[in-house]
Image: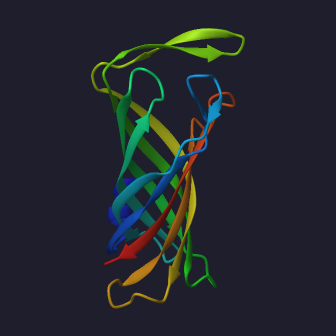
Amino acid sequence: MLLLLGFAGGRAYGVHVTTGFYKSLMDVQDKNGKEATNPLFPAIGVGTNFEMTSAFRFSPQLGYISHTVDSKDSYGKYKMSTIFLLYDVLWLPKGFTNTAFRFGLGTFRKSISGKGGAVTIPNGNSTMTAYRPGKSQTSYSGTFNLGADIQFEFLRDWFDKFGVRGEMFVFRPLSKEYRNYSFILAAVGYF
């Protein structure tokens, strides 16, 4: 419905391309049960903005995150990749000529593939068996998104507008136990 509203609302304001880094804020465990933080992963995206009103734009974006994770156990590496679709709305408040705030929903499609197998991992005072997929497996997650775009005046020879985007994604926002936060910090260029 948001997509139709964006298209019906008015003209498109060019194409924007983002490139930056994605990070999940949920820590993971290594093979010894110690917390290990997730690294930064490269991310790219492409989207556009559609005028809804003078202060609001619909800003859909399609993106890709590449994960290569060293599992740090005898099963070696496994490959993860994420494709995401964001259904954001930009708010352009009066008096903020170079800043726009964004909010919306997102869909993240994560695929994982590897050689398969099982590994025993610590789980509090006991252990648990975790199974690795032997073929490609896919999961889908919905998000609530909050962020901001800040534009700069330089690089006008290459872009109509250039700036940075910071956006936070809240996975499972209604769950106190399983809620997770991730973010993207990226350069954004409008053509």
Q: In this rendered view, identify the residue nearer to me: 13 or 37.
A: 37
Up the image or down, 178 lies above or below 124; here it is: below
Is 160 drawn above or below residue 147 in the view shown? Answer: below
Image x and y of residue 152, in percent: 51, 84
Q: Is residue 11 visible?
A: no
Tell which residue pokes out farthest to the left in this image: 135
User: Coloured how?
Assistant: rainbow
User: Total marks drawn?
Assistant: 0
Q: Residue 59, can we see it?
A: yes
Which percent across, then down, holds residue 4?
Answer: 34, 56
Q: Of residues 113 and 156, which is closer to you in this image?
A: 113
Instruction: Identify the image quadrant of residue 137.
Output: top left
Instruction: Identify the residue at the far front of this view.
Output: 74
Q: Is residue 187 left or right of residue 160?
A: right
Q: Residue at x 50, y 72 (%)?
A: 164
- Residue at position x 48%, y 52% from top? 22
Q: Quadrant of residue 9?
A: bottom left
Q: Residue furthest right?
A: 125
Percent position (x, y) of residue 58? 43, 63
Up the image or down, 35 lies above or below 65; here it is above
- Please determine whether, in this image, residue 106 is positioned above or below residue 163: above
Determine the image quadrant of residue 126: top right
In this view, the residue in front, 77 or 19, is 77
Quadrant where the image shows the C terminus? bottom left
Residue at 51%, 53% in the rendered image = 104
Residue at the (45%, 89%) spot, across then down: 154
User: Residue 76 at what x, y percent from top left?
Assistant: 38, 27
Q: Is residue 136 left or right of residue 25?
A: left
